[in-house]
Each structure stands twice: as C-alpha cells, then as structure tokens.
Image (tube, rainbow, N blue to C red):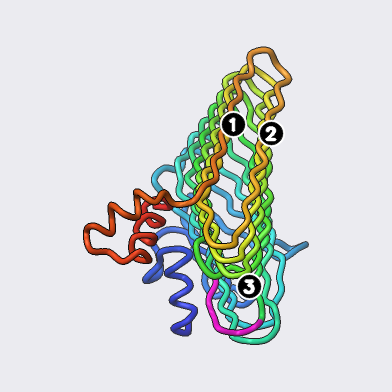
Amino acid sequence: MLTDIQKKILEEVADLHSVPTGAYNFRINGQKEGRNTTANIDIVTKTDVSGIDIIIKPGTKKESVHIPVVISESGMTETVYNDFYVGENSDVLIVAGCGIDNCGKQDSEHDGVHRFHIGKNARVRYVEKHYGSGDGAGKRILNPKTEVYMDEGSYCEMEMVQIKGVDSTERDTVCELKAGAKLIVKERLMTHGDQHAVSGYKCHLNGEGAVADVVSRSVARDRSYQKFEAVIIGNAPCKGHTECDAIIMDDARVLSVPALEANNVDAELLHEAAIGKIAGEQLIKLMTFGLSEQEAEEQIINGFLG
C-alpha cells in the first residue's frame, strides 16, 4: 500500500494518478512494488546487479512503459542499472523518473544508470523527471548516467526535467549515432537555495546523415550553482547543434561549456549559449496588468521553462 507521500511523488515524476495501462515497474525504497508486462514488452530482473532489462519486440507500436523510482526513507543510497532493448521499427513511450522525500538528517541518494539500445528505424520518446521534497536536513541527491546507442535510421527524443527540490545532481549522458539516426534532447532545470546541478552531454555522430540537437533551458536562483557542458563530435557528414539558455537570479552562478569537434569536412556543427537576468521591461509590462514583481517573475520563469 502506497503512502500519500509516495503517491504524490509518483504523480510528480511520472504523471501517474493510478496504475498505468501497458508495461510498468514501480520501485519503492529499493524494492519492487509492482510490475506488469505485455505481449510486446517484457521486464526482467537482473541477476548480477540491481536493476531491470526492458525488452521491446520489433514492430511494437503505440505502447508505453513506466519505470518510476520513489525513495521516502532518510539515509537510503542505491545504484540501479536499467537496460532498454528497443526492437527495429518500433514506436514507444518510456517514462522514467525519481522522486526523493527526505524528512530526516541523513542524505538519501539514487544513482540510475540507463542504457538504451535502439534498433534500426525505431522511434523512442523518453521522459525523465526528478523531484525532491521533505523538510529534513538530509540532502536529496540524484546522479543519473545515460548511454544511448542508436542504429541506422532510428529516432530518440529525450525530455530531461528537474524543477524542484533536488539538492545535488550530476548528469552524465553519452550518445553514439549511426547513419541517419536523430537525437533530440530537451533539458529543463531550475535550482534554488544552495543546490548544485551539473549536466554533461557527449554526442558522437558516427554515421552519414546523423543529427543531434541538445538544448538546455534553466533558471538558477538564490545561491545555487549550475554547469552545462555539451560536446558534439562529428565523425561523418552530419549535423549537430547545442544550445544553453539560462536565466540567472539573486547570487546564483551559471557556467556553460559548449564544445564542437569536427573530424569530417562535411560535419556541420553549431553551438549557442546565452546567460542573463530577467529583462526589466518584461517585469514592467506584466506589472502593468496588476501583478506584483514576484508574481511577474514567476510568470516569466514558468513561460521560459514551459
């Protein structure tokens, strides 16, 4: 039986108000809470390390798999390994995410290692949300590591979201794309208080016609720190783009480190980076409609991260 806090976290990280249709695996405080497989999607517990294999049959269309993680015990630390095997010509939605509620004095930490093996001409939409809550002195720590291996003609769209409550996170993502593969990454991040967030992406475009587009939008408030580092490596005739757009407020700090490496004369690579405060004219315009300065700031931030 899930507690109200656990239900709230599931709603935040996976948009779940009830048990989803399709395949799912719920992990609560280090234990399997529930699992369902389908004729086309199997979920198998690993025997050598903590984690699961998600096996999606070739040709699977319009199906989903949810694998949320919830930690509501102070002092709990775990590392979980999940491998996704997406068959050729399939089209699926994968929803992951982790929420930590820490009301104690000890740190709680979840380190998730996700490896995606995406078959030829397969399409994947992946949503990963991180969330923290609780009034304890212990930190809420999330360190995701993601590896993406894309076969010819495959497509992957990744939505990485962390908006509230995570004290420390270090994201490390490595991608390898074969000919005609396309990767879209959309990161949305907000830090506040003394929070610390580092995001690193390294994309190897190894095949002709490979495309990678990595975009981060973030807001840094109070005394928080953010670092965004994106490396696009063009090893073939390909197209790569990375963009960091950040709003900085109060005494926060933001570091953007874009890098491009062209190893082929027909590699087209581009990076953009912008860091700035909320424009005064934007605040004034909204305040003329009766909003306070704080309400105007929130409206601007919500629109920017939306």
Q: Nearer the viewer, residue 181 or 133?
A: 133
Height in image: 197 above or below 147?
Answer: below
Q: Which residue is mark 2?
A: 259
Amino acid residing under circle 3: Arg
Amino acid residing under circle 2: Ala
Callout count: 3
> Which numbered circle lies on residue 271?
1
Dot 3: element: strand
Amino acid residing under circle 1: His
Kindly check if marks 1 and 2 are in contact, taking CB atoms under 8 A apart as contact: yes
- Please tell me which of labels 3 and 1 falls first in the chain: 3
Q: Which residue is mark 3?
A: 140
Residue at image coords 63%, 27%: 178
- Please tell me which of labels 3 and 2 falls first in the chain: 3
Spatial CA span between label 3 and label 1: 32 Å
**Which one is in front in this view, the residue at disc 3 or the one at disc 1?**
1
Residue at image coords 44%, 83%: 4
Asked whether, in this view, residue 213 is left or right of residue 53, the answer is: left
Question: Could you say where residue 303 lies in the image, as x and y percent from the top left?
Answer: 36, 52
**Which one is in front in this view, the residue at disc 3 or the one at disc 2?**
2
Spatial CA span between label 3 and label 2: 30 Å
Kindly check if marks 3 and 2 are in contact, taking CB atoms under 8 A apart as contact: no
Asked whether, in this view, residue 44 is left or right of residue 299, the answer is: right
Magenta extent: 132-137
Dot 1: element: strand
Q: Nearer the viewer, residue 165 or 18?
A: 165
